Each structure stands twice: as C-alpha cells, then as structure tokens.
Amino acid sequence: MSSFTFKQFHINQQHCSMKVGTDGILLGAWADTNHCKNILDMGSGTGLLALMLAQRSTSDCQIHAVELDPAAAQQAQENITLSPWKSRINLVQGDVQHFLSDTKETFDLIVANPPYFEQGVECKNEERELARYTTQSHLDWLTWAAERLSEKGKISFVLPYEAAKTLEKLTALCCVKQTEVITKIGKSPQRMLITFSKQSQKLVHEQIVIYDEKNRYTKEFTELTKDFYLKF
C-alpha cells in the first residue's frame, strides 16, 4: 500500500523502505505518554510513531523524530506537515547516534521500532536493507537512548520476542514493563513490547493477542488501537 489512513492523520509511504505495520502501531498505541513533555522517536521511517505519540500526548509535549534515510525523512516530513501536530514534531534527517551525541535535550519517553533481523537474504535495495537489518545491536540503541533519558523517563521498544529477552539480560537498566505479542490465540509470542527505566519498579508483565480462533481481532487489540484504526 502506498498510503495508510488513520482516524486523525494520513501516512504516505511510497518512498519509505519499511511500510506501516502492526508492530509500529502497537508500540505507538502502547507506550506510556503520561507526564511527557519531550519525546524522541529513534528511526522514524514514515513518521508513524511520532504522529501516534503526538495524538496521544498533551498539547505542550514536543516530539523529536530522527530518520537516517533521506527519502524516508522527506516523506515523514510531508506526513507531519499535513498532520494536526506539525508545530509539535521536529524531524531530523541523520544518524540516531550522532543526534543523541550532539543534542543537549533530555527525553521523558524514547521509542524505537528498530531493525530486527540479522544480515541474511539480500534486499532489493540499499535503503530497505538499512531499515530491515541490524547494523548496530539493540543494546547499542538502548545505551545511546539511556544517555539522554530524563531521570524518570522511559525507553520503549518493539522487538522479536527472543531479542527482547536477550536485551533485558544485557542492560543495566530496569525492565519495568513487558507485553508479549501473540499473533493468534494458541500460538507462541513472536514479538515483545518492552519498557526500560533508570528507576527500579515492579515489573508489569502482560500479553496481547491480535486474532482470536476465528481470525477476528480480539477485544484487547481493538481497545488498544481503537483511536487509530478506521475499522474500529
């Protein structure tokens, strides 16, 4: 699909290597925006997460979105400009690590739907390969984010299930929330929504199932995403 329409905004994506997907929508609907005045979207792609978080946060919350690929960054900027929140979202075309090294800002929430897969099947173009494959580790991304996290801030990623469990073991940050994502009832979790903090808290562990046994969206998935999907 070259475009995707949500209840309050529209995404054009014909120039973006990685399109709108369920993982990003789940993260954008799930991440905790309470008490956030400054949010960072690492690897913004189409601008989806930045726009979802703008919709869910208060009018005085500023969102910064960083995207490496020039074509994707240009399209994300177009999507942001056409949205109701263009004055609250600042898009930067560049490398996430360099942005975090250079900025003086701290962030109350940092989100990422980072590259998932180890190098494998060759992609059709370099841009898609950059978006799809992990050139740095997830621990690198988490470590960079932690450097600019406010004292009570949170970092939320969506990752393959095993990658999330591995990341939890590697970091010194506190894992404060995990939501296992199960595509269809009866299957094993394939993804995890995971949140880290500098401050120790009791871990909240949940599951969300997307489809029931009759391939209908479950009540919990519908409830989580109802402010975005036109079909709900």
Image (cartoon, rainbow, N blue to C red):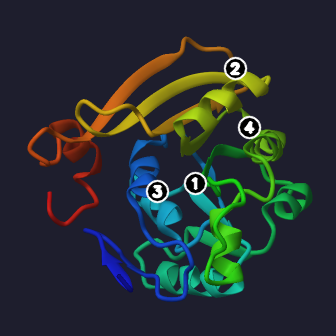
Label 2 sits on residue = 199
**Residue type, label 1:** Asn
Image depth: mark 4 or mark 3 in front: 3
User: From the viewer's perspective, is residue 23 above or below residue 8?
Assistant: above
Q: Residues within 10 Å of mark 1 (few under 14, many from 20)?
A: many
Name the residue rendered at 14%, 57% in the picture: 232
Q: CA distance from mark 1 to mark 3?
A: 6 Å
Query: Quick one: label 4 or label 3, which is nearer the N terminus?
Result: 3
Q: Nearer the viewer, residue 100 or 70?
A: 70
Looking at the figure, which quarter contains the N terminus? bottom left
Q: CA distance from mark 4 to mark 3?
A: 23 Å
Q: Nearer the viewer, residue 123 or 70?
A: 123
Query: Quick one: label 1 or label 2, which is nearer the N terminus?
Result: 1
* Residue 2 visible somewhere in the drawing: yes
Q: Nearer the viewer, residue 147 or 54?
A: 147
Q: CA distance from mark 1 to mark 2?
A: 23 Å
Name the residue rendered at 47%, 18% in the picture: 204
Q: Position of residue 218 (x, y in %)?
A: 17, 40
Query: Quick one: label 1 or label 4, which is nearer the N terminus?
Result: 1
Image depth: mark 1 or mark 4 in front: 1
Q: Position of residue 148 (x, y in %)?
A: 80, 45
Q: Residues within 10 Å of mark 4 (few under 14, many from 20)?
A: some
* Residue 113, numbered label: 1
Is mark 1 in CB contact (under 8 Å) with mark 3?
Answer: yes
**Residue type, label 4:** Ser
* Residue 188, numbered label: none
Name the residue rendered at 13%, 38% in the picture: 213
Q: In the figure, is residue 173 to the left or right of 116?
A: right
**Residue type, label 3:** Gly
Residue at the limit of the structure toward the front, as seen here = 121
